[in-house]
Image (cartoon, rainbow, N blue to C red):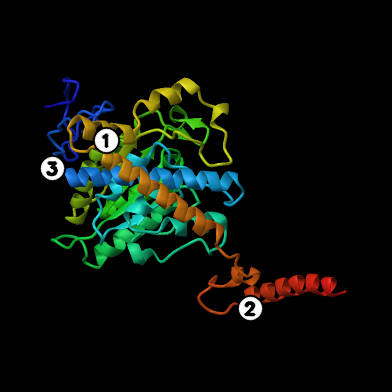
Amino acid sequence: MTVNVAGRAASADPLRGQPESAELIQLLTPEGERVEHPDYPLEISVDELKALYRDLVLVRRIDFEAIALQRQGELGIWASLLGQEAAQVGSGRALEPRDMAFPTYREHGVAWCRGLDPVRLLELFRGVSHGGWDPKAHNFHLYTIVIGSQTLHATGYAMGIQRDGAVGGEDGEAVIAYFGDGATSQGDVNEAFIWASVTNAPIVFFCQNNQWAISEPLERQSRTPLYRRAHGFGFPGLRVDGNDVLACLAVTRKAMQAAREGQGPTMIEAFTYRMGAHTTTDDPTRYRLAAELETWKLKDPIERVKAYLVRSEMADEKFFEGVDAEAAEVGTRIRKACLEMPDPEPLRIFENVYAEPNAMLENERDQYAAYLESFETEEAR
C-alpha cells in the first residue's frame, strides 16, 4: 500500500508503483511554499532556481510581444502559452542536449529552453519562412499544426534511436512528445501509445492539460483522468501540477532518465490552465466563465516562484528588477527583428518541396511566374 498526499491509502499500481489515485504531484504550492515528495526529490541550488524564474518571465514576455504584434497585423496568428510557462520550462530544462523534443505549435517555452531564437518562431507566424528550422541544430523538431500527428513522428523517432543502440548506458537518448488534452481524442495519439508500448520505445508523452480543447471542456474529451489512459496501453501515467515548475522539472527528469535507460514510455499529464485564448482568432469569453479564470490566476506559475524566492530570502528587489529589464530588452529585440523581416520572393514557395526535380511542381511554378509577370505587363502599359 502507498499513501497519497491527502493521507488516504491507495492501492499500488503494478506499473512502476504509481498510485491509482489522481494524486497531483507538487513541490511548490501556489502560495510559494516548498513541499517534498518521496518519489520525486529535487535538489536545486539558488542560482538554478533564479534561472528558472528568469526563464518563466522571459518566455511570458516573448508571448506578450507576439500577441501584440499579431493584434497590430504583423503576425498572421499566434498560439499563446500564457499560464503554461511552468509546464514548458520545467519539462524543457529536464532534457539533456542529446534528447529530441517534438512540439505542437504552442511550445515557445520549450523552444526557449532548447536555445532556439524566438525570432525564428515569429518568422513562421509572420509567413516569411518555409515554417521551420533545422531540427538537429537544437534537437527541437518543427512545429506541428495537425493536431496530434507529432506523437507518431516522435514515436517513430524513438523506435529509430532504440534500433540504433542509442538507449541504455550513460549516453542514452530519449524523446519527448508534447500535446494538449484535446489531442488525446485523436487517433494518431492513441496509435502512438500502442506503438510506444509494444516496442518499449524510449519516449515521454507530455500532455499539457489546459482544460480547454479550443472551446470543448475536458469532460467532453474524457470520462477518466487523462494520465490513466497510459495504464490501458501498458505503461505508467502520472499527473503533475502543471503550474509548478519544480514539480514539472523533477517528474520529467525522472521519466526521461527511465526512457534513456530502456524502461520504456511514460505519460505525464501536466494539469494546468490556458489563461488566454486558444489562438489569437479565438474568443474564450464565449465558452468559459470569468470566475474560472480568476481562480487560476491565484495559481500563477511565475508568482509562486517569486513568492518562494522572497519568502526564503534567496532574491532581492534588485534581482527582480534586473530580470524585468532583461525581459524588456528581449521584447524590444524580437519586435524590431519582426518588423525588419524581409518578405520572401513569391516563387520561393516552390523551393524545397521535393528532394528532387518534379515536373508537376515545375509546371505550377512556371504558371505562377507567368501570372506574376502579367501584372508587370499591365503596369508597363
Instruction: Tell me the residue that label 2 is attached to.
Output: 359
Residue 373 circle label: none
- State how far apart marks 1 and 2 are (Cα): 57 Å
- State how far apart marks 2 and 3 are (Cα): 59 Å
Instruction: Tell me the residue that label 1 is attached to.
Output: 305
Where residue 379 appears, as percent x and y from the top left, is 83, 71
As helix, strand or loop, the secondary structure at mark 1 comes to helix
Q: Residue lying at the far front in this picture: please name it.
A: 318
Labelled pair 2, 3 in contact (Cβ < 8 Å): no
**Precedes in sequence: disc 2 or disc 3:** 3
Pointer 3: residues within 10 angstroms few (<14), some, or many (20+)? few
- Seen from the viewer's position, the closer of residues 254 and 51 is 51
Where residue 232 appears, as percent x and y from the top left, is 30, 38
- Seen from the viewer's position, the closer of residues 34 and 72 is 72
Q: Amino acid at mark 3?
A: Glu
Q: Residue lying at the far right in this picture: please name it.
A: 381
As helix, strand or loop, the secondary structure at mark 3 comes to loop
Labelled pair 1, 2 in contact (Cβ < 8 Å): no
Where residue 165 appears, as percent x and y from the top left, is 21, 66
Q: Residue at x 25, y 68 (%)?
A: 164
Instruction: Tell me the residue that label 3 is attached to.
Output: 43
- Residue 223 shown left or right of residue 268 in the figure: right
- Seen from the viewer's position, the closer of residues 246 and 218 is 246
